[in-house]
Image (spheres, rainbow, N blue to C red):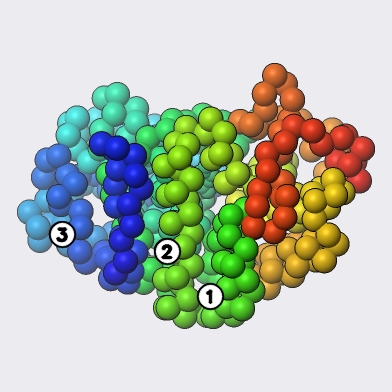
Amino acid sequence: MQTLTVDLGDRSYPIHIGPGLLDRADLVVPHLAQKRVMVVTNTTVAPLYLARLTATLEAAGIAVANVVLPDGEAYKNWETLNLIFDALLAGRAERKTTLIALGGGVIGDMTGFAAACYQRGVPFVQIPTTLLSQVDSSVGGKTGINHPLGKNMIGAFYQPRVVLADTGTLKTLPPRELSAGLAEVIKYGLIWDADFLAWLDANMAKLRALDPAAIAHAVYRSCEIKAQVVAADEREGGLRAILNLGHTFGHAIETGMGYGTWLHGEAVAAGMVLAAATSQRLGWLSEADVARTRTIVRAAGLPDAAPTLPFDTWFEYMGHDKKVEGGKLRFVLLKKLGEAVITGDVPEAILREVLPR
Ligand code: NAD
Ligand code: GLY
């Protein structure tokens, strides 16, 4: 097991990474405010891992309740969120009862938001079970739900007490979901670390085959970069926005195509290629850099081309973006491979060239 820390003063917390962590009550119990938890999971993950986690915690003297939600991005909404509150109230959960998110990013984002709201804030723990949630969504405290007009537009910054990334759970993940997680891993190389990008070029086949050492390194380095960025800018006053490379385009794809049609990671992958193409037209990347971005995205089993949407639809959905300032779109682009830049100065003519319509 490897451990690193998200450094946020008195709200700092550890991220533990490795196989078999679902059996480690000792990593969770010290972070509980009372010997009572509510596990939030979904209909896919519950049959795989809920009994095991429950047994681990009960053996340590913890009372474990649970709520099992329907599975899918299309359920990341108010109605499903309310099922968590229904279960908390029906079970008379208290202010010190800890919520545990057991699942991918959808479960993590909704559980964190429920924890931020229930009785104005109860403790929560992240146990991410997809690659995407282990390298990104479980770390950094962004929680929330979707609105029909915009992705993740309703939510809160609310940090977990501990993150347990049990890499053994990735064995049951469908290959398409593994690839979706690799999109966010590639993102860290593109925005922050050219050496890591080169390592990913060389190790993509191992990652797709779930080679334990390769997966451990990819999860650790991704969390390390994310923890560094979040510690510097928790509430996205500036720097943290770089973690959204490809997301302005990607969120428009997800919303425009209907939640769940394109996976979040797939939309981000196609969005990163669009960001690279835009950066090239601004004179920052070479054609070879754009080709390399496409190649690594394809090697990860991800789409390197966005779907066709009417130009107005692109603009409508890109306009519902949390980076919009004074009504003006802002984009995360690349100055070079391994270095991101945030800019509001992208001429519409360039967007008309790169966006498929
Ligand atoms: P997801 O939560 O929908 O999980 C993908 C699928 O895998 C689901 O069907 C899920 O039930 C299933 N699954 C989960 N673990 C499994 C396992 N071990 N074995 C088999 N199946 C398993 O999707 P995701 O890719 O994990 O997360 C995407 C979500 O995360 C999006 O809503 C996105 O907006 C959000 N996100 C949030 C942040 C953040 O900082 N909060 C960052 C990135 C993405
Ligand atoms: N996934 C973007 C962020 O956490 O800021």
- Residue pointed to by mark 2: 220
Q: Disc 3 residue type?
A: Asp
Q: Residue at x 35, y 47 (%)?
A: 6
Callout 2 environment at 10 Å: few (<14), some (14 to 19), or many (20+)? many
* In the depicted structure, whether residue 145 falls above or below residue 205: above
Q: Looking at the figure, which quarter contains the N terminus? A: bottom left
Q: Position of residue 38 (x, y in %)?
A: 24, 44
Q: Disc 2 residue type?
A: Tyr
* In the depicted structure, whether residue 274 falls above or below residue 120: below
Tell me which label, 2 or 3, sits earlier in the chain: 3
Q: Residue at x 38, y 68 (%)?
A: 167
In the shown orientation, is residue 120 left or right of residue 34?
right
The verdict on label 1 being within 8 Å of ligand 1 is: no
Tell me which label, 1 or 2, sits earlier in the chain: 1
The verdict on label 2 being within 8 Å of ligand 2 is: no
Q: Residue at x 58, y 60 (%)?
A: 193
Tell me which label, 1 or 3, sits earlier in the chain: 3
- Residue pointed to by mark 1: 207
How many angstroms separate mark 1 from mark 3 (CA)? Answer: 29 Å
Q: Position of residue 223 (x, y in %)?
A: 44, 56
- Residue pointed to by mark 3: 26
Q: Secondary structure at mark 2?
A: helix
Q: Quadrant of residue 74?
A: top right
Q: Looking at the figure, which quarter contains the C terminus? A: top right
Callout 3 environment at 10 Å: few (<14), some (14 to 19), or many (20+)? few
